[in-house]
Image: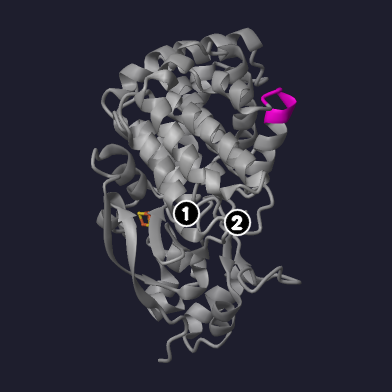
Amino acid sequence: MATLHPTRRVQALMPLYVQRFACIGAQCEDTCCSGWTVAIDKKTYESYLQTDQAALAERMSAAVQRLDPPPSDAHHARIALQPDTGECPLLEERLCAVQKALGEDKLSDVCFTYPRKVQQAGEVYQQALSLSCPEAARLALLAEDAFEFTEGPIAVRPAVVAQLQPQSGLSLDLMNEVRFFCLQVVRGEGLQLWQKLAVLGLFCERLEQALQAGAPGRVADLMQSTRELITSGQAAALCEGIAAQHDMQALTFHLLWRFSETLHARPTQRGVFEAIAAGLGADPHTGELPQAQLIARYQEGLALLPTALQAAPVLMQHLVLNDMLRDMFPFGSNASDDKAKPSAQFLRLAARFGLVRFMLAVQCRTDAPLPQPSALVRTVQVFARRFQHDTGFAARVDTCFESMGWGGVEKLFRLLSP
Ligand code: SF4
């Protein structure tokens, strides 16, 4: 049978958890596509029309709908998921019928790639995973050495490798240096995670100013002065003076969270939604949640969260590192994103960090014993499934932060401070 999607082997940089990952198939508590619409690229769609396996062809013609007009070759058709379970209608005993009958080569680009994301920045290929996959989330968030980096061969479909483009007069080599510098700030010792994020916020603001001024030559000095800010203890001193604004944190992140509540919770996600609903204690009939109660419950949960995280000490840090790697922080992985400026990237990173912390804190506030690491990981996984692949999330963050008056990096620090 002719190869439909040729692959290429390349050497890629990846964290250890990526190298350790293997899909657990039918043992998985979720499925790759639950809750989403599966995009089918043009080449795959046309091959499905020609399949000679009658039973599969019949199922595919019922499940796969061509888009009219297709917005792009990558989104030429779609598989609508089962309305009751949110699962793909082409699953058989929780395994993909297309892969089973036709092989991996006949999977659409999206199905072949998930949960992996491969990116290329100049000579450097890198691979990360989406934490919306439960097995990826466990491996990334619980193992202490998950974010040690290694190199290894991977098979890629060249058409789906995201390319980092040179921006604002920066070479790709310098952009890679900046990206790994930012990861190093988060991996470094001596500051709390939110303080490291605050340092990144300052760095991004200054980086953007330098790029807007047409002075990419200042970038190396900026990295050096940021290192000195940390090692001299000035960064810690600066952060000590920042007072947390728990009331505004609760209101802001609840606003973002509520959008997700309006979507139908899939059966596999229900436990997390129930734990958060119990933690907030909204009226079960009217959904009413007085502001004072929301703030009090969030604060109580925030006070409990460090104890719950003692059993998963790297969870929050690894969450942030994965986010940064996947999104090629601080440049963004979407070349067509006109908001792909470092300060906008930072705002989105801070929003995702704050929203996950809100969900985990509220989960801790339920009357049950504190959640175990597996339950915390599950919450992050549901977060990633709900928000990380949602193309409208970034726009909602921008609107929400603007309406709540969080413009400017220094104001954002009060949103980060616990
Ligand atoms: S979500 Fe992850 S572990 Fe589960 S079936 Fe998909 S790739 Fe495998």
Which of the pair 333/315 is nearer the observer?
333
Residue drawn at 43 percent across, 29 percent down: 196
Q: Magenta span has 380?
A: no
Q: Where does the magenta region start and end?
A: 401-406
Quadrant (top left/top right/bottom left/bottom right) for the N terminus: bottom left
Depicted 67 relative to depicted 353: above or below? below
Distance (Cα) linking label 1 and label 2: 10 Å
Q: Place residue 258 in its image quadrant.
A: top right
Query: What residue did someone put label 1 on?
Result: 174
Q: Position of residue 40 (x, y in %)?
A: 57, 70
Q: Residues within 10 Å of mark 1 (few under 14, many from 20)?
A: some
Q: Residue at x 42, y 71 (%)?
A: 97
Q: Amino acid at mark 2?
A: Gly
Crowding at mark 2 (Cα within 10 Å: few <14, some 14-19, many 20+): few
Q: Residue at x 63, y 50 (%)?
A: 391
- Mark 1: amino acid: Leu
